Amino acid sequence: MTTIGSIGLKTLLEPISKKVERRSAGRRPPPDNFSVFRWNGSRLTQEPVKDISSTGLYILTEERWPTDTLLSLTLQRPGPLEMNPERRIEVQAKVVRCGKDGVGLAFVLKDDSESRQWASLREHLIDRAKPEDMLSLVRLVEAVAFLSRLCPGEADKVRELLNGRLSKHKLANAVAIALKAENLLAGEPIRDKQRVNPNLVIRILEDGSCSDEVWLKDFWGGLLATCCAVDAKDQSSLFLVESLSQLTTFLPRLRYNLRQPAGSLS
């Protein structure tokens, strides 16, 4: 099938395909052709690609994820972030097997309308944020993938916020909140079934992005995690959102007043 992801993947793999044809050796490109970069919940990781084709890849890693685990990957040549988007690709892959030295994954290249909307949002955000290093890029890619699982069918609402109302700085804060929530939910057995009311997601990301305090962004991430529900209809967290919003707006005013000379406060 033809998709945004598969087109980019075909372009990226074209030099390897030509080498393979010349050698008539099937799936045996040199082991240093590509590296996989991903966000593991707390830091950027880079893992070499042992084997790759148009349908999947095998990476050398000590991780052993359960079968069907979905990973968000950035694939490019080893080294610093490729600023030319045609020389890298952001793609999702599913674990299909574990070997002695690594893990085999199959690319997930969907061609439905919703997948194209989320892929388009991801590309627009990358273009707008213009990340200058691999860490910033993989955090953004992972955050969008997480939100797509929490809010299926709501790409337009998330786009309106992330690609419209938030500044570049606030976008980085919203990414931090989303990744904190994902990390807190990482051990949950129903992770891919969790859903959040999209209006709550928008409110949490928008209000939480106003804070630069790490501990306060962690609170917002924790609130997003606790809002997860299978049916996404529970509005009981709205009170907590309101309370944390008031705290977020109160702290800057308090900090400003504390800096004023004695007797000047109104």
Image (spheres, helix red, strand yellow):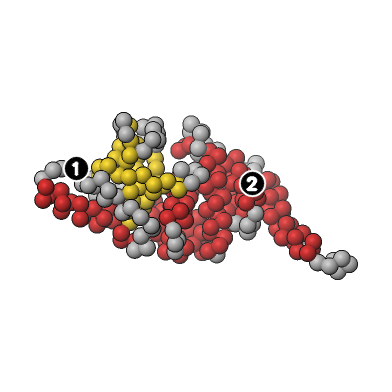
Q: Is residue 192 left or right of residue 94?
A: right
Picture quadrant of residue 27? top left
Which residue is drawn at the image coordinates 48% and 33% (left, top)?
A: 190
Asked if residue 81 can be seen in this view, the reply is yes
Which residue is drawn at the image coordinates 73% and 57% (left, top)?
A: 251
Residue tagged by mark 1?
27
Residue tagged by mark 2?
219
Percent from the top left, x then y, of residue 233? Answer: 57, 41
Q: Amino acid at mark 1?
A: Arg
Which residue is drawn at the image coordinates 55% and 39% (left, top)?
A: 184
Name the quadrant of the C terminus.
bottom right
Q: Amino acid at mark 2?
A: Phe
Picture quadrant of residue 122? bottom left
Most foreground residue, 189 or 103: 103
> Of the residues tagged 2 and 1, which is closer to the observer?
1
Percent from the top left, x then y, of residue 253? Answer: 75, 61
Which residue is drawn at the image coordinates 64% and 57% (left, top)?
A: 211
